[in-house]
């Protein structure tokens, strides 16, 4: 039953498919029949936009047969209309085959001569055409008429830099204004300057300029208008007045002259209140005579400006001053150079002060003082000075006051009273003599506390005898000062030095070799000390540098030596102390044995001698550092120092170096101890086992070969022909196996006693 149901469903679906296929075929056939009735207005070719179109413009379009059948002639009608006007129609005069196109031109021309835009509409019709969506074409044609550029109005002359106005384009038609143009070089070049409007506002033009308008012609050529010129007149140069003057009120007459002007004077004007108000003098002359002025007066000239505004010249001033009498000064004085400070003042009434003047040569020549006040101060004058004041006289002579005199006494020169001196207190004799005194001596002074206090000495002569003085003393003399304060001479110091006390050195003694001793000086009183030593029993003495001290630690003693101290005090003779002798005790001789080498981890017995007892240092790797022959187990190469002491307590030392080698090193021992103690009994070359075929040769001092081996095994015991060789130094040559390295050196044989 299930199979039958599936079969029925399949047959039903197949039946529906056949129905849809039939409908699709019908639709396709119907569509093909519809296309056969479609005439298509595909494109237009003319007329196009342009300049000066005429009344005879050809209308051309492309007609297309959008079907699969031939369309006979006269079955297709083509129409056109301009700007919605009368309709023109014309049939196709030949057959239009299936899918073909035809450039169709109307025989009746279109009138497009009117300037501006024209709308053209073209359409086709054919009986049975069922698709009218492609039957019509509409487009716009622009007819631009040639430009009538017109002219800019009008030429004008203006004042340079202070002008404004408007230029206009007149007589212009057609086209579009692009911009205003200007030229400042007579039309050779033009520059765009303004907006596209028929008028242009100029402002503050500073040179002759031509203006015109650029016009866009659209489809017609562009053009420019006629130009107008704005001509510039420079502002008038009013000129300058010469003849300004400062005159006295009883002779204020003269001439003013205008020069440098480029226009005609209109009138002169003057003011007697500083320019507040002006009085006009009708005169077109370039000069003006003024007479008997009693007040200060300002003059100016008004000059014609023509196109520009009238302008004034600069001003000229005739300054008129009254006459003033001379001024009386107060403040003359006599002063010392140390306090020559004060002021001189003008009295009574006086005019404006121009400056003060001073003279230091009794009024022969004068120097200006930059001071316009009624008094003149002076500070710390160093010489007699005259002062006077100059007041303004205007055009009248300047007024000179009377003279004030400031007498300045210079300081008397300070005399000298002789050279200071230092004298030993045991013999004080001398005289101080004054030189260079310009005024009388009042008295002498002395001070025994360094100048803190002074005591007068009744003596008004120019000399003083200080013989017998017992302490250091300062001396000076006081002299009369005149207008200046009394003053002093320079100061002389007579210094007394006392004899030095050298003191006593500690006693002589012994010192171990290479040690130093402390010496001490007792009871010394002196300014300075120095120590001396002698190594020839006091025959000659050497001074020890930088030894100004009572305690002295000597240099290392290496021989018998004597010491002494020398004390100094000022100019007094030096004092020498007693002598001490240091006897050198030689250090005991220590012997730490010979340097040797061992492998890492091996031990070696040290052998020390000398003195009455000794100690090894460092002792950390020794079996016992207080015995003479301890066993050493150094981890690395080290130097052991053996210190010994003798009965006098002196110490000596010696060092033995134990070299600790890495077993893999190739190291040639330089000693054989032939004492059968199993230590260094044979000649050992460390690492020779790693270099087979190592060849060795041993020679005596005469070059005779005593031993040879081409593959040495550390087995030579220092024998030759079966007998041990004598103790001594021998020479070897070792050629390291497998290499080119050759070693030469010496080997020492010991133990064959």
Image (cartoon, rainbow, N blue to C red):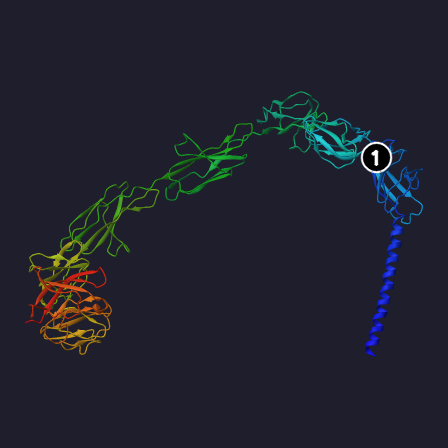
Q: Is residue 679 above or below residue 730?
A: below
Element carrying mark 1: strand
Residue 456 place in picture, x, y as percent: 25, 52
- Which quarter of the rendered picture does the C terminus lie within? bottom left
User: 527 left or right of 168?
Assistant: left
- Which residue carries the number 1 mark? 143
Q: Nearer the viewer, residue 169 or 439?
A: 169
Q: Is residue 607 above or below residue 124?
A: below
Residue 578 visible somewhere in the drawing: no
Q: Nearer the viewer, residue 187 or 114?
A: 114
Q: How many marks?
A: 1
Where residue 25 sits, quadrant-wise, is bottom right
- Which quarter of the rendered picture does the N terminus lie within? bottom right
Q: Nearer the viewer, residue 132 or 284?
A: 132
Residue 30 place in picture, x, y as percent: 89, 54
Where residue 53 sits, quadrant-wise, is top right
Residue 5 place in picture, x, y as percent: 84, 76
User: 307 left or right of 489?
Assistant: right
User: 583 left or right of 739?
Assistant: left
Crowd rating for badge 1 (residues with CA inside 10 Å; few <14, some 14–19, many 20+) = many
Q: Nearer the viewer, residue 345 or 125?
A: 125
Residue depicted at x 20% and y 73%: 618
Residue 42 visible somewhere in the drawing: yes
Q: Is residue 669 above or below residue 66?
A: below
Residue depicted at x 88% and y 60%: 23
Residue 516 place in picture, x, y as percent: 15, 66
């Amino acid at each position: 039953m299930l199979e039958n149901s599936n079969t029925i469903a399949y047959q039903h679906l197949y039946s529906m498919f056949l129905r849809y296929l039939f409908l699709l075929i019908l639709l396709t056939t119907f569509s093909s029949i519809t296309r056969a009735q479609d005439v298509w207005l595909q494109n237009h070719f003319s007329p196009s936009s342009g300049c000066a179109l005429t009344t005879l413009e050809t209308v051309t379009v492309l007609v297309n047969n959008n079907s699969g059948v031939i369309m006979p002639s006269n079955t297709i009608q083509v129409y056109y209309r301009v700007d919605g006007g009368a309709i023109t129609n014309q049939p196709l005069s030949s057959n239009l085959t299936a899918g073909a196109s035809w450039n169709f031109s109307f025989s009746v021309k279109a009138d497009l001569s009117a300037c501006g835009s024209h709308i053209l509409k073209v359409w086709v019709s054919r009986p049975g055409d069922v698709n009218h969506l492609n039957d019509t074409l509409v487009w716009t044609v622009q007819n631009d008429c040639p430009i009538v550029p017109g002219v800019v109005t009008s030429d004008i002359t203006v004042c340079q830099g202070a002008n404004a106005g408007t230029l206009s384009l007149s007589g212009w038609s057609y086209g579009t204004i692009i911009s205003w143009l200007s030229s400042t070089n007579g039309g050779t070049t033009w520059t765009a300057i303004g907006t596209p409007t028929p008028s242009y506002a100029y402002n503050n033009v500073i040179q002759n300029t031509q203006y015109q308008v650029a016009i866009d012609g659209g489809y017609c050529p562009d053009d420019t208008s006629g130009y107008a010129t704005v001509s510039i007149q420079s502002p008038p140069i009013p000129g300058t007045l010469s003849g300004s003057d400062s005159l006295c009120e009883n002779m204020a007459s003269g001439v003013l002259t205008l020069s440098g002007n480029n226009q005609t004077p209109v009138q002169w004007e003057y003011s007697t209140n500083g320019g507040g108000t002006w009085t006009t003098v009708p005169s077109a002359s370039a000069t003006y005579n003024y007479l008997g002025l009693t007040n200060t007066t300002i003059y100016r000239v008004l000059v014609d400006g023509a196109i520009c505004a009238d302008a004034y010249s600069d001003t000229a001033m005739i300054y008129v001053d009254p006459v003033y009498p001379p001024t009386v000064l107060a403040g003359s004085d006599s002063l010392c150079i140390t306090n020559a400070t004060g002021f001189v003042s003008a009295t009574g009434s006086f005019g404006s002060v121009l400056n003060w003047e001073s003279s230091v040569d009794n009024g022969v020549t004068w120097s200006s003082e930059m001071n316009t006040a009624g008094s003149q101060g002076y500070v710390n004058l160093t010489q007699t000075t005259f002062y006077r004041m100059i007041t303004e006289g205007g055009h009248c002579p300047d007024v000179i006051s009377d003279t004030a005199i400031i007498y300045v006494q210079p300081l008397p020169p300070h005399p000298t009273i002789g050279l200071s001196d230092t004298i030993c207190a045991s013999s004080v004799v001398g005289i101080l003599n004054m030189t260079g005194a310009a005024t009388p001596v009042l008295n002498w002074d002395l001070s025994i506390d360094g100048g803190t206090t002074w005591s007068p000495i009744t003596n008004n002569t120019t000399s003083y005898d200080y013989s017998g003085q017992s302490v250091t003393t300062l001396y000076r003399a006081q002299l009369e000062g005149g207008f200046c304060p009394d003053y002093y001479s320079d100061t002389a110091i007579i210094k007394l030095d006392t004899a030095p006390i050298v003191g006593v050195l500690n006693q002589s003694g012994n010192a171990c070799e290479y040690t130093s001793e402390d010496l001490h000086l007792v009871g010394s009183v002196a300014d300075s000390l120095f120590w001396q030593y002698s190594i020839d029993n006091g025959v000659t003495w050497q001074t020890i540098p930088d030894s100004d001290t009572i305690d002295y630690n000597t240099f290392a003693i290496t021989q018998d030596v004597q010491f002494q101290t020398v004390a100094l005090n000022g100019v007094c003779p030096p004092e020498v102390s007693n002598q001490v002798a240091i006897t050198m005790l030689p250090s005991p001789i220590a012997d730490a044995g010979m340097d040797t080498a061992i492998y890492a981890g091996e031990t070696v017995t040290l052998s020390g001698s000398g003195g009455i007892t000794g100690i090894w240092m460092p002792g950390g790797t020794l079996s016992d550092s207080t015995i003479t022959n301890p066993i050493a187990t150094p981890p690395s190469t080290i130097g052991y120092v053996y210190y010994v002491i003798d009965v006098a307590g002196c110490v000596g030392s010696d060092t033995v170096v134990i070299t600790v080698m890495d077993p893999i090193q190739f190291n040639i021992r330089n000693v054989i101890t032939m004492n059968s103690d199993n230590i260094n009994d044979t000649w050992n070359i460390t690492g020779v086992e790693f270099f087979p075929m190592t060849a060795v040769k041993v020679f005596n001092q005469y070059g005779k070969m005593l031993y040879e081996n081409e593959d040495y095994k550390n087995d030579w015991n220092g024998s030759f022909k079966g007998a041990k060789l004598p103790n001594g130094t021998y020479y070897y040559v070792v050629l390291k196996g497998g290499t080119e390295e050759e070693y030469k050196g010496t080997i020492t044989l010991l133990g064959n006693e």
